[in-house]
Amino acid sequence: MPHKIPTRNGLPPRRIYEVATELGLDTEHILPHGHYIAKIPITELSRRQRQPDGRLILVTAMTPTPQGEGKTTATIGLADALRRLGKKSMFCLREPSLGPYFGIKGGGTGGGRAQVVPAEDINLHFVGDMYAVEKANNLLCAMVDNQLQHGNELRLDPRRIVLRRVIDLNERSLRDIVIGLGGPLHGVPRRDGFNITPASEVMAILCLARDFGDLGRRMTNMVVGFTYQGEPVRAEAIQAVGAMQVLLRDAIHPNLVQSLEGTPAFVHGGPFANIAQGTNTAIATRLALKLADYVVTEAGFATDLGAEKFIDLKCRTAGLKPATAVIVATTKAIAYHGGFTETGGLGNLAKHIENIRRFGLEPVVCLSHFPDDHPADQARIIKFCERLGAEAVVSRHFDRGGVGATELALAVLRAIDKSRRKSARFLYPLAAPIEKKIEAVATQLYGADGVDLDRTAQNNLELLNRHGFGKLPICVAKTAMSLSDDPELRGRPRGFRVKVNELRLSAGAGFVVAVCGNIVTMPGLPKVPAAAHIKISPTGRATGLT
């Protein structure tokens, strides 16, 4: 028996053919996955190259609390509200990961009246994109180890293989393992480990690729390890790229779904925001801009992580031009970060407003409403934003859907009108040295006094420069719980320096990851994981999934 899909006013979701028709898509060309999901072939993008783009709206946030502040619900609610105002709108989200879903964070389809449906399908196996990424990555890993087994003609140093296997689950015991045990017939013993699938370079490549050809070129350039002489070995030399492209043949097509109110949505790609660019695929965003007049998308975490990567990585690569940005804030986040002071919660929010303006965008502050909020606290936040010249509005999208986000939508339209003659700008030029790019992000967006590279990072930097990777953009991996690299420094910290522990090359994705603090690419489960509460009834209905 199929699971129950939430409805609004007793009406079931629209069939996916109706959603596609609203966007002007030929229903004969879409690839349906049941009644409510369809893949849209990327050929639709090439057919619409001469059409003008719609307006792109980025949803980001102030530094979050451990529970998050509701960027996904704000994204959905804003798109619903724009559609209610008669605008042709849609939104773009990332695909949720099973690891956090069965761990502690939960799903990635929103909540309350601001949801994307069918939520259970999207949060679970969806259309198999995660598995395709996993299999493509692990095929390359298998062929790397096969190279070692059969003579190692590439002279690949087993101690310097940087490619890791992936799985879409939280499993801390797989972070550091030894493989190839059992004698000569069972492989070459070496130290290895797993990453979670969304943190893989293959996922980042899928999300930044422009088309099939670019997907192949990027995977060809993946560096899997280094020789005994310190020379990079690329995936091209392993001869796995063709098979990897075949495994990703269907995953490259964006996935069309809808909100509870029927607003069209692309849910496609799922990179983490502290290791990769943290947004949905560039292909889905580019296609959405051809299909709708207003496209709302979110970037993981706050302006210092997701928004920075969205602009400096995704927009630079895909040629995107955001019209404005929404900063999601809550009274509980203001309290968590030190309350109503210039160095506490209000100071934190002020820094994020400042950050968005550094990119040349005029922000709107979305004050997400919670039942226990005090109106006086909300009024203080709104007045504080007014003093900074930023419009802030209370939004009740969670409990009222698009109706509750109407004031937010109107504020966004006003911000777009004010920004009409402006264009977003990047934080640093690609020609700058890697260490200067990291310094630009740390000093301008975090408020740090400077950056320190430890010995490992300095050695990594020398290797990257020697092999011509110094002109790549950077992707800083750090805690999301602070503007600094220390999760305990809440509010708007000052007088700190950022320490870079390691520089990791993602040559195929086209960036260098600067690892700061205790960042792990394979999460663990909490003492009582969410999976412990998930059951299935004799009739096949699941409980505990949301």
Image (tube, rainbow, N blue to C red):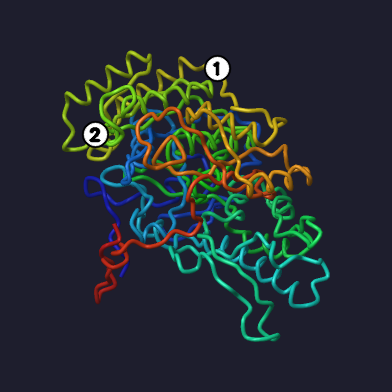
How far across and down, in percent of the image, does residue 25 sit? 53, 44
User: Between 16 and 351, which is closer to the camera in this rendering?
Assistant: 351
The quadrant of the picture occupied by the N terminus is bottom left
The image quadrant of residue 178 is bottom right
Residue 11 horizontal side relative to residue 241, left or right: left
Name the amino acid type tagged 2.
Answer: His
Q: Position of residue 201 (x, y in %)?
A: 61, 54
Give the percent coordinates (x, y) of residue 88.
44, 32
Quarter of the image with the C terminus in it: bottom left
Callout 1: few (<14), some (14-19), or many (20+) C-alpha neighbours within 10 Å? few
Nearer the observer, 164 or 33:
164
Q: Is residue 476 above or below residue 152?
A: above
| Label 1 element class | loop
* Residue at (22% x, 25% y) in the render: 378
State whether residue 70 is above or below residue 247.
above
The residue located at (63%, 28%) in the rendering is 428
Separation of residues labelled 1 and 2 (CA atoms): 31 Å
Asked if disc 1 and disc 2 are in contact, CB closer than 8 Å, the reply is: no
Left-right relation of 79 to 381: right
Q: Tell me the amino acid under the disc marked 1.
A: Lys
Q: Which residue is mark 1?
A: 422
- Compared with residue 12, is residue 349 higher up or lower down, i.e. above or below? above
Secondary structure under the numbered disc 2 in the rendered image: loop
Residue for point 51% across, 17% down: 420
Residue drawn at (59%, 24%) of the image: 425
Taking the image as shown, residue 3 lies to the left or right of residue 94, namely: left
Q: Which residue is mark 2?
A: 369
Q: Residue furthest right?
A: 153
The image quarter containing residue 230 is bottom right
Circle 2: is it few (<14), some (14-19), or many (20+) Cα within 10 Å? many
